[in-house]
Amino acid sequence: MAKTIIISNRLPVQLQISNGTISAIPSVGGLATGMKSVHSGGDSLWIGWSGLTDEEIPKELAPKIDEALAEHGSSKVNLSSAEVDGFYFGFSNRTIWPLFHYFLEYSEFELDSWNIYKAVNQKFADAILESADDDDTIWVHDYQLMLVPQMVREKRPNISIGFFLHIPFPSFEIFRTLPWREDLLQGLLGADLIGFHTYDYERHFLSSVRRLLGLEVSFNDIYLDNRIIKVDSFPMGIDYKKFSNAAKEHQKNTTAQQSDLQQRLNDHKRSTPDAKLILSIDRLDYSKGIAKRLNAFEYFLNKYPQYKEKVRLIILAVPSRSNVPQYQLLKKEIDELVGRINGDFSTVSWTPIWYFYRSVPFENLIDLYTSSDIAWLTPLRDGMNLVAKEYIATRTDKTGVLILSEMAGSANEMNESLLINPNNFEQIADSLNQAINMPIEEQQERNTHLQKRLARYNVEQWANDFMSSLQAQKDRDAANVSKRLTEHRLNTVLEDFSKAKKRLLFLDYDGTLAGFHVDPQKAGPDKELYGLLDALNSMENTDLYLVSGRDKDTFTKWFLHKKYNMIVEHGVWISQDGEDFRMLENVKNDWMEKIRPVLESFVDRTPGSFIEEKNYSLAWHYRKTDPDFGNLRANELNTVLTSLIANDDLSVLNGNKVMEIKSSNVNKGRATVRVMGEDDYDFVFAIGDDWTDEFMFQELPESTVTVKVGRQKTQARFYVNGIKPVRDLLKRFTD
Ligand code: GDG
């Protein structure tokens, strides 16, 4: 039976060793809960690090640990403390984490830790490969494991792999500074589906893929050799019921049942009934903006002194990555700030900040959420921020105000909260003032909308959505595979070929027989290609035609001496048996005077683009331009040309990074159909890679063996994956 394999840095269970016995306790984190529907029963496996290094695991207990984990459907990857240092504290948390959160100055580029990151990713990949079957589904989580998808893909080309990034994906300008940027992208592209929390992260990623790898991206599909990779956003939700139910239960508690913390909070409320409690909860991480928040609080107290003794800020900072120096410095900074602000503002009966540096049990988390009038979350960058969602979920009477940084992914879905820029102290102080004075009805109105949305798109929904999208990707692949020119199908084609009395072959050139080059003149034929074409051309009862959009001078130079038949400029010219080119279509070129200046103005304004002038067409090439800018300009040019040529018999062909203006009654379809009529052919074959070749696929009779190179949408009957497979296929005709 097909199973699901989930991979994350940490397993969803905590190991506890006491008196020589081992116990594995399920974690209660958001991810573990969200994956419940995916990770259940016997048909799923979770692979990750246990949290204990090899050195920390007593040898005699190792087998017992495996057993204990297996009971929770988990299996561990063993890591030594050196590996944890290099991979987790090193490359993950000193390179990727700061860089992806726009803390460029904290990002360390160390070759050693990169090498350990690679080696540990390979360990995770190997652990997957050991347990995975071809029909399994793999879901890889987060920034620690970005190379894993490709490492698995290499060994299992057909397995279904999804990847989800829990942190932001930064803009290209930031990402490009990483020395191993291409490696990370290629690692991710091993997946079939790559998920992010927000559309912004998705678009940053796509932009890096286009600019750094030069891959073709269409909407949210990436075309890579023989695969289409889907990129999408899935905003992670919370276990809404768990939080809202806990809050409801919490309300029912008698004083005796209440936690110590809750009783203290109640005392405080009783003693200062109109004072407001402001809550902030984060891991102690520089991305969360805790120090800035403290400064902003001081600013607020100075701007609105009337709230002295009337507000209290509770800061819960959960210890995190305390081995990383940056975090130690931050801890010191926060300690000092809290001390100073409290020192400056405290009165005998009032301390403005209650500061806790620890993690608290779930019960206390609920105490804090339900007792606080305002949740104040001001990360400088945050992939999502689940605390914001959890606070809203616990507000059973729908009161409470959320002030949230617009730099958190959750801000996209939480428009009804007070959104602030964490660097704008003026705005923050005013928002605190607004929150303190917000009428109850308004609070309830805002929270009603928020709760509805959070209850619906909860974490389970998120996980299921991701999995169904991955499944859909698999199905789409299967549908595509239906057109693949498999060995079986090829054998039928070859049989028809050998039985035929008279054969006709139409071969497109660029992107089919030869690869693209930034300078089209340099993409000339190589020795192997000449050999292949010679062999085809010398076959009995076989007419070979090169069919191209190229100009006749280039093809004359490259191929006339070889006496291959050629159709160029999309069908304007034809050359047969080594004779000079003659016109196949009677076309005009007087329109060029009007169009050329327009194209020239686009060349002037689009660095890297250029005009190719053919006898009967003009082409604007933009392969060498910035990809986004090039596409933008191409759209603009399209609009300009459409209105300009409305009354002429001209059309615009949008090829692969080229726009070509030419006479409407010329295209490869029309030309090839004409040639076909010259003899009695009982086997016709046409192969090509781009839009202009679709004319052949559409217009040639249905019995034609039409083959598309690449996986884009096509009218062709079959597809193959690239230039090498094209050459292999043609070679089979000559065997
Ligand atoms: C990363 C991304 C993204 C916190 N303190 C205590 C406690 N918590 C729980 C909260 C919440 C979770 O920890 C924190 O989640 P966040 O989303 O706020 O932040 P990160 O840990 O940075 O998570 C983040 C997330 O991944 C998911 O994709 O949203 O952007 O950085 O659930 O409740 N729980 C308990 N005691 C505490 O003291 N019990």
Image (tube, grey):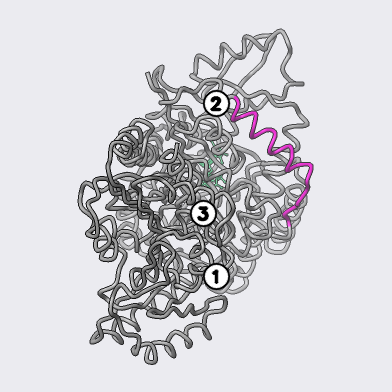
Q: Camera-side residue: 648 or 456?
A: 648
The residue indicated by pointer 3 is: 277
Magenta stretch, main secondary structure class: helix
Q: Is residue 301 visible?
A: yes
Give the image quadrant in which the ligand numbered 1 is located.
top right
Q: Is residue 297 above or below residue 27?
A: below
The image position of residue 35, as x and y in percent, is 43, 32
The residue indicated by pointer 2 is: 128
How dense is the environment of label 3, judged by Cα within 10 Å: few (below 14), some, or many (20 and up)? many
- Whichever of callouts 1 and 2 sits on the residue coming sooner in the sequence is 2
Q: Is residue 324 above or below residue 560?
A: above
Left/right placement of residue 475 relative to residue 297 reads: left
The image position of residue 249, as x and y in percent, is 37, 33
Distance between mark 2 and mark 3 Cα atoms: 48 Å
The image position of residue 96, as x and y in percent, is 65, 49
Q: Label for residue 715?
A: none
The residue indicated by pointer 1 is: 626
- Whichever of callouts 2 and 3 sits on the residue coming sooner in the sequence is 2
Q: Camera-side residue: 107 or 187?
A: 187
Amino acid carrying label 2: it is Ile
Amino acid carrying label 1: it is Asp
**Residue at 51% across / 45% down in the picture?**
724
